[in-house]
Amino acid sequence: IHPSYYCIDGKPLVYIYRPSSIPNAHQWISKMKDYFKATQNRELLVGIVQYLPNDKLPKIYNADLVLQFPPNGFSKMAIATPAPKIQRETLPEYLILDYASMINENQSLEYPSEVVRTSFPAWDNSPRKKIGWATFVGADPKSFQEWIANNLRSAKLDNSLGITMINAWNEWAEGACL
């Protein structure tokens, strides 16, 4: 492991995006952890990305953590303009969502200690999607700063690692750059 690799208590941290797409994910992750322990002589922390609302239970996959992936995995975001209720399977042509409601939902829910709260500076994937795109209105540096500060306070209370993450820190296609 390279010295600059992110570790928590000496354990390298790796996240798996969409573990549900891996056949026998629980077994595969177990083997990965065992191999790492045998070859590196230390434990590996494995997290899964919460792509869907039901991806909140890391033990299903033998993972240690769940990384929120907003706006994915959230269900009660306020629509800024009239549109049908959000359903991943039946997205309307577009959604214009309220950034403040995303923050409020994130802060109002209680999470198990394995969940790492995550924020994003802005979101607009309309430039790369013709159908089913979403954008958030009301995102600004002050709101983003408050969201991160709230996540840090919450991390000290409900996150066993005391960390928070930022999604889309350099997603130019989503208009989310720091």
Image (cartoon, rainbow, N blue to C red):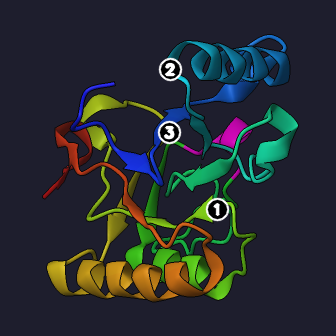
Whether residue 97 sits left or right of residue 145 in the image: it is right
For the residues labelled 1 and 3, the Cα–Cα distance comes to: 27 Å
The 10 Å Cα crowd at callout 3, few under 14, some 14 to 19, many 20 or more, is some
Disc 3, disc 2: CB below 8 Å?
no
Residue, x 72% and y 73% (percent of image)? 111
Whether residue 68 sits left or right of residue 122 in the image: it is right
Q: Nearer the viewer, mark 3 or mark 2?
A: 2
| Disc assigned to residue 50 | none
At label 1, which amino acid type do we have? Val
Label 1: which secondary element: strand
Mark 1 or mark 3: whose residue is earlier in sequence: 1
Q: Quadrant of the N terminus?
A: top left
For label 3, the residue is 132
x, y (%) of residue 110? 72, 81
Label 2: which secondary element: helix
For the residues labelled 2 and 1, the Cα–Cα distance comes to: 26 Å
Whether residue 141 sits left or right of residue 121 in the image: it is left
x, y (%) of residue 129? 36, 31
Q: Nearer the viewer, mark 2 or mark 1?
A: 2
The 10 Å Cα crowd at callout 1, few under 14, some 14 to 19, many 20 or more, is many
At label 3, which amino acid type do we have? Gly
The quarter of the picture where residue 100 lies is bottom left
Q: Which residues are magenta?
A: 87-92
The quarter of the picture where residue 3 lies is top left
Furthest toward the left, the residue is 178
Mark 2 or mark 1: whose residue is earlier in sequence: 2
For label 1, the residue is 115
Residue, x 56% and y 52% (percent of image)? 67
For label 2, the residue is 40
